[in-house]
Amino acid sequence: DEKAKRRSSQREKADLQRKIQSLEEEKSKVLIQEKVREIVRPDPKAENEVANLRLELVEQQRRTRDA
């Protein structure tokens, strides 16, 4: 009778450990996805600033060629 209880509790423990592990893996995957999304998303203000700087660079190169 005690052997059956031990087996049952060991099964429950193993099942809980599997559930915990799978939840931890899922959670870590979600965190990774969130970080990737943050990195991939461009900042509109930064994009505008980069575009303006590129225009300035092109204008500066034209002035240098003309001079």
Image (cartoon, rainbow, N blue to C red):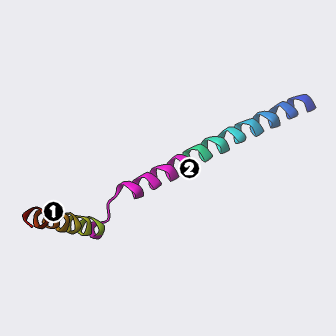
Gap in angstroms between the C-alphas marked 1 and 2: 50 Å
Which amino acid type is shown beneath numbered disc 2? Lys
Q: Residues within 10 Å of mark 2 (few under 14, many from 20)?
A: few
Residue situated in front as seen by the camera: 6 or 26:
26
Q: Residues within 10 Å of mark 1 (few under 14, many from 20)?
A: few
Residue 16: percent from the left, percent from the top? Answer: 71, 42
Query: Which residue sits furthest right?
Result: 2
Which label sits on residue 27? 2
The reply to whether the magenta stretch includes residue 38 is: yes
State which region is magenta: 27-45
Q: Comparing marks 1 and 2, which lies closer to the viewer?
A: 1
**Residue positioned 32% across, 65% down in the render:** 43
Going from the N terminus, do you reach mark 1 or mark 2 first? 2
Query: Which residue sits furthest front?
Result: 67
**Residue positioned 65% across, 42% down in the render:** 21
Instruction: Note whether 3 is above or below 49 in the view shown.
Output: above
Q: Which quarter of the figure is the C terminus placed in?
A: bottom left
Q: Which quarter of the figure is the N terminus placed in?
A: top right
Residue 31: percent from the left, percent from the top? Answer: 51, 53
Q: What type of secondary structure mainly makes up the magenta span?
A: helix
- Secondary element at tag 2: helix
The reply to whether the magenta stretch includes residue 28 is: yes
**Residue positioned 20% across, 69% down in the render:** 52
Decide if residue 42 is on the left or right side of residue 24.
left
Residue 1 visible? The answer is no
Residue situated in front as seen by the camera: 58 or 50:
58
Instruction: Note whether 38 is above or below 53 in the view shown.
Output: above
Q: Which residue is mark 1?
A: 61
Which amino acid type is shown beneath numbered disc 1? Gln
Decide if residue 39 is on the left or right side of residue 13.
left
Contact check, label 1 and label 2, Cβ < 8 Å: no
Residue 42: percent from the left, percent from the top? Answer: 32, 60
